[in-house]
Image (cartoon, grey):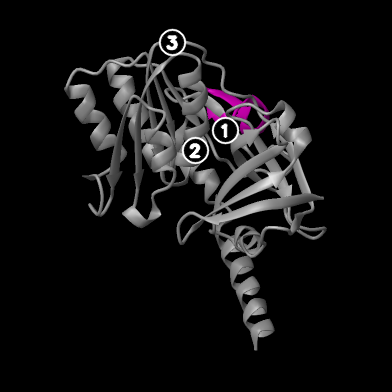
Amino acid sequence: MHKILRKEELTPETTLFEVNAPQVARKCEPGNFIMLRIDERGERIPLTIADFNRDAGTVTIIFQKVGKSTYQLSKLSAGDFIRDFVGPLGKHLEVGKVGKIVAIGGGLGIAPIFLKIRFLVEAGNEVTAIIGARSKNLLILEKEISGLAKKYYVTTDDGTYGLHGFTTDQFKILLDEGLRPDLVLAVGPIPMMKAVSNITRERGLRTLVSLDTIMVDGTGMCGSCRITVGGKNLFACVDGPVFDGLQVDYDEYSARQGRYKAEEKRALEAYNCKCQARAK
């Protein structure tokens, strides 16, 4: 059992938990993730480690309310317990000092990009950050990222804040102005990562992306997170989640992500019905 020490509603859709998990905090690195289960009957869901404190033994997760389990998770409060909190899982980001880096985070992808930026800056890299959301009220961790990156830019789809457009629009502006990064790191929705990779492929820029695939066990046994990278079948849980963005088959990845949409919708509808019945 793992106690929730702090809860913060970052946006109407996004929640932050700081969880007491000393064994995970002791070994985790940027890019790792955890698998959690709310209770004995809960499903296993993977969540990226957004931050951690080894001394305090805490791990921070940030999640979006999109399905039954994440809605149920959002109902918990500080002082409540999560049944299973397993990690660190996956391969952590290994970059070191490479020079100039552009880090692009879209939507919930801003959470995992934040921790990566912190460690890249600590390694002596010069980081330019581009973060974007659908609207200003859905933007997260702007203060934290602006305090780390040498330069940072914000975009919103609806133009309520920053550049009116996508993160890729701002990225192309910087490239056209002469920016030539040694590495591009992108985390966010599949169309965004695909678009970033298409831009960098044309310019011959090294690109890393972090893939948030459907997982069951998180240890390479089930094959649910299978993806194709460079023509090879790999598992995001043990071979990633960070991969060469220029080698990912994004069309296959996108198709596999949508294969349980109908079941997810039914599960959420059933959960909402139960919640409404209890409230009466």
Q: Which mark is residue 252?
A: 2
Foreground pick, 124 / 130: 124
Could you tell which of marks 1 and 2 lies nearer the N-terminus? 1
Q: What is the distance, in whole Å, between disc 3 and disc 1 at their CAs?
A: 27 Å
Q: So how many labels did they put on this image?
A: 3
- Say which element carries label 1: strand
Three-letter residue code for mark 1: Ile
Q: Are marks 2 and 3 in contact (CB under 8 Å)?
A: no
**Left or right placement of residue 15 versus residue 127 in this view:** right
Q: Pick out the residue farthest to the left.
A: 177
Q: Are marks 1 and 2 in contact (CB under 8 Å)?
A: yes
Q: Position of residue 142 (x, y in %)?
A: 39, 42
Q: Is residue 126 visible?
A: yes
Q: Which residue is mark 3?
A: 98
The nearer-to-camera label among 3 and 1 is 3
Three-letter residue code for mark 3: Val
Q: Residues within 10 Å of mark 1 (few under 14, many from 20)?
A: many
Point out the stretch of residues depicted in magenta: 228-241
